[in-house]
Image (cartoon, helix red, strand yellow):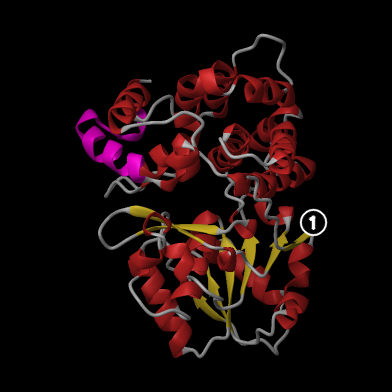
Amino acid sequence: MATLTFCTTVVFDHGAINQIGSALKGQGISRPLICTDMGLVRAGIVDKLRGAMSNEFQATIFHDTPENPTEEAVLAAAALYREADCDGIIALGGGSSMDLGKAVALTVTHEGDMISFTAGVGGAQKIGPVAPLIAVPTTAGTGSEVSTGAVVIMSNGEKLILASKHLVPRMAICDPDLTLGLPSLLTAATGMDAVAHCIEAVCSRQINPPADAVGLDGIRRALGLGNLERAVADGVDAQARWNMMMASTEGAMAFTKGLGAVHSMSHACGSLPGLRLHHGTLNAVCLPWILRYNHEKIGEALQSISSAMGLPQGADVSDEIEALNIRLGLPPSLGAMGVTADMIPYLSEHAVKDVCTFTNPRSVNRGEYAVLFEQAIAG
């Protein structure tokens, strides 16, 4: 049975940030909590957002979003939301800020421990309407501005997924200008996050032809038309940035049909204390290994992906992704990112329970994850 779910209202183009005032009015928000990080404060992006808002809006800023959002940070932001008597949220930043904003919107409207709302324990059924949320992405990678999910490191150390139609932002403002000048390595890592979303969605065992079409268009924009490598090479290529932000949004629209073992491995690695590993980089490194593992189940999908990438007939998609990672300057292995063999038992246990495992096209057990982690660590 197919379930087709799309999406929120998206204002998309250069200069779209100037629509923030009308967006707030449309959602009945006058006292927003801006969930962001110190990097965007220092870069002047928060001031740019506030400058696009008239004085009728009283904004409060939470700027302590960690690289991987934590339950502790969510609770701190929720406390500030209540203290300032906020009536809505603007999530400004990459996936971390948007995921944190979603979790805050849930926390200020629901009673109970956050872990009880996670997908692995059937928490989606407990999630009702949340505080109004407007998402403003500043990277082209996660697509969280249109997705139903948020990933948070819980107080017990597990990196788990909150997922509900109620967590989709009421509105998204996608302004590619906010990504101009993003450092090349971060552009590469977030861009490969978008690519991984598109590819895993197309390969997912769920049936959703419209999502497949959207995912393939995202792959074409990012890789087939060369926009990812153009954006990495030239930080102010406005056309490449526009296409990469579209590919990012399309990636999240596509993974309404589910993701796969790439994300299960990434979520496990992202929960490792002390390493603070970037999710998009993890996806890039793990993607070739999972494509090889899934190969026997995704022949038709691989043909479509290869075509969208503009590859010659007979090219090996996993090898091409591996070569692309090298050209982009991304790490060649999980080992190069600090992941070690002694971590494999923990990582395998975490990954096999991750909800993304359930939509991988080929079943994966704990032992098979252990082998995959071993391969990805060695490179």
Magenta stretch in the rendered image: 336-353
Please state the horizontal and vertical placement of residue 319, each as a whole percent of the image.
54, 16
- Residue furthest to the left: 342
- Looking at the rendering, which quadrant does residue 133 occupy? bottom right
Looking at the rendered image, the quarter that the N terminus falls into is top right
Q: Is residue 343 above or below residue 253?
A: above
- Looking at the rendering, which quadrant does residue 166 occupy? bottom right
- Residue furthest to the front: 1
Left or right? Give the position of 271 relative to 341: right
- Residue at image mark 1: 14
Please state the horizontal and vertical placement of residue 127, each as a whole percent of the image.
49, 70
Give the main secondary structure of the magenta stretch.
Answer: helix
Residue at (60, 41) in percent of width and height: 194
Q: Is residue 336 above or below residue 193?
A: above
Left or right? Give the position of 221 relative to 200: right
In-front residue for pair 36/370: 370
In-front residue for pair 271/119: 119
Amino acid type of the residue tagged 1 in the rendering: His
Please state the horizontal and vertical placement of residue 331, each as a whole percent of the image.
44, 29
**Within 10 Å of the Cα at label 1, are there few (<14), some (14-19), or many (20+) other Cα atoms?**
some
In-front residue for pair 83/268: 268
Q: How many marks?
A: 1
Q: Is residue 339 magenta?
A: yes
Looking at the rendered image, the quarter that the C terminus falls into is top left
Residue at (48, 19) in percent of width and height: 292
Left or right? Give the position of 376 relative to 46: left
Q: Is residue 373 magenta?
A: no
In-front residue for pair 180/280: 280
Residue at (51, 68) in percent of width and height: 101
